[in-house]
Amino acid sequence: MTGTGAGRVSPKNPEGCGPLAGLRVVEIASLAPGPFACMILADLGAEVIRVDRVGDVPGLMSPSGVLDRGRRSIAVDLKSAAGREVVLKLVETADILIEGFRPGVAERIGIGPEDCAARNPGLIYGRMTGWGQDGPLAAAAGHDINYIGLSGALDLIGRAGERPLPPVNLLGDFGGGGMLLVVGVLAALQERARSGTGQVVDAAMVDGSALLTAFVHGMHAADLWDGERGTNLLDTGGAFYDTYECADGRYVAVGAVEPHFYAALLDRLGLTEDESAGPDALPVQYDLDEAEVLRSRLAAVFVTKPRDEWAEIFAGSDACVSPVLSPWEAHEHPHNRERAAFVEVGGIRQPAPAPRFGRTPAAVPQPGSACGADTTNVLREVGYSAAEIERLRGAGAID
């Protein structure tokens, strides 16, 4: 089948590690969610060739290059006919293309789904947008905060009586965006194995972040989520599911939802829920109307010791208490160290590939190439002669 990469070895993955080894992905350079999706595909063994724009500023798309790890780069002028032909030539050898343009832009450039399918009917064409390929907002600008605002996800996050709190850009860009795109293109690949034909995957951050709220919709339907932010079981409405400040100004996370976990929490804190204890008895765990009373009692204990001392006190228990670590100290935790959950790539510590595979483990990622560093080699691989490459470079179609 055109575009299948069985047996192909990526220079960034010379040992052919990972379950996606042999697949080729063409990535049209874009911002956050698209590169994140391609990072995951590269982590899992796919060969990803990033098509940067001629003249791109290094690091503009992915500061420090973390999201660009594991792939080669060619620099192409997509506005030129020769540059478009370079991309279409790459498409002939690819399994997947990922682009993050607003709807209609790829078609105007000449590298839209129909253009690519004419060269490679088996191509999976992944489209990453905020609002999707259709609908009243399809052509509008936006960012993570806008997409999760419209999907209902943002309204869930924050304390009672306070405004919604944006969770950085994790829900829209990465969880509901890039991660969902990966699911989509892999599902399309599985279908292609049966049909022999590629298809378009329309991944929208508004759709993906809405999907992440499925559990809350179920809770609401069961009258277990009243719709008011910060007053429900898992949104700090319950004092047993919250963060608490410690003596050193750092925090612990408490997730003692089930009664037996909650009992372990109280035991390690030296508190009791015994109703016979008189006026000092704690409120009933699930009485959310008394949550602030319970929260203040827990807070008064946690603030007496530093975070890491609490971590030692709760070690080995089922109280569901853990230290709140910054991203820059998470690699130091013994559990993360033993599992090698963080790796160093190009001198930058960052999360390791995930998930893990028993028979086809992923390799430690290599740094991504600088903009245009692999143009000559990649074009040679797809059949361009040295003279043709020089003509393209002289015309400004490539760099």
Image (cartoon, grey):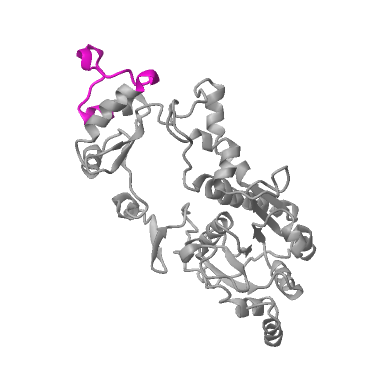
In the image, is 361 to the left or to the right of 248? Answer: right
Q: Is residue 137 above or below residue 54?
A: above
In the image, is 258 to the left or to the right of 30? Answer: left
In the image, is 153 to the left or to the right of 129? Answer: left
Say whether residue 189 is magenta: no
Say whether residue 266 is magenta: yes
Residue 376: image x %, image y %?
62, 80
Q: Report whether residue 121 is seen.
A: no
Q: Which residues are magenta?
A: 264-291
Residue 46: image x %, image y %?
57, 63
Q: Residue at x 30, y 51 (%)?
A: 333
Q: Is residue 283 above or below residue 356?
A: above
Q: Report whether residue 356 is seen.
A: yes
Residue 21: image x %, image y %?
56, 63
Q: Residue at x 48, y 51 (%)?
A: 355
Q: Nearer the viewer, residue 323 or 93?
A: 323
Choose top left, top right, bottom left or bottom right for residue 250: top left
Q: Residue at x 39, y 18 (%)?
A: 289
Q: Is residue 203 above or below residue 92?
A: above
Q: Nearer the viewer, residue 174 or 257?
A: 174
Quadrant in the picture for the C terminus: bottom right
Quadrant in the picture for the N terminus: bottom right
